[in-house]
Image (tube, rainbow, N blue to C red):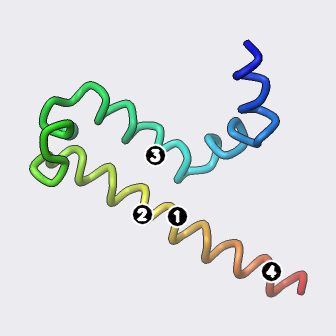
Amino acid sequence: MDEDTEARAAGEDRHLTTPSGLAFKALLEHTQGCEQCTDDPTECGTGRALVRTVREARRVESAATARVRDVHG
Ligand SMILES: [Zn+2]
């Protein structure tokens, strides 16, 4: 229970509500249960698609953050 509290204090919950956080969580959940990803992630189409989704989401989010900074800056 202490560990959960620390994770929340570090902003884990908030992080996981972002599109890239949710995509990363889906990627982790897939790779943990996928033999192919454990063996060689580049050989798994699902794993590759999830990695691409995480990258796309992060790019969109960093672009959005840059725009917000411009507006307020
Ligand atoms: Zn996989």
Do the residues under discs 1 and 2 have CB atoms within 8 angstroms? yes
Q: Amino acid at mark 4?
A: Arg
Image location of residue 19, percent across then percent down: 55, 51
Report the Cα–Cα distance between label 1 and label 2.
5 Å
In the rendered structure, which disc, 1 or 3, sits on the residue that comes first in sequence?
3
Q: Amino acid at mark 1?
A: Arg
Number of residues whose C-alpha sits closer than 10 Å to that of mark 3, classed few (under 14), some (14–19) or many (20 or more): many
Q: Which residue is mark 1?
A: 58
In the rendered structure, which disc, 3 or 4, sits on the residue that comes first in sequence?
3
Picture disc at residue 55: 2
Q: Which residue is mark 4?
A: 69
Residue positioned 71% across, 22% down in the render: 4
Q: How many marks overall?
A: 4
**45 and 2: which is toward the camera:** 2
Picture disc at residue 24: 3
Quarter of the figure with the N terminus: top right
Judged left or right of residue 29, residue 15 is: right
Position of 63 relative to 36 (above/below) = below
Q: Amino acid at mark 3?
A: Phe
Q: Amino acid at mark 2?
A: Arg
**50 and 10: which is toward the camera:** 10
User: SS class of the residue under badge 2?
Assistant: helix
Establish whether ligand 1 lies closer than 8 Å to the Cβ of label 2.
Answer: no
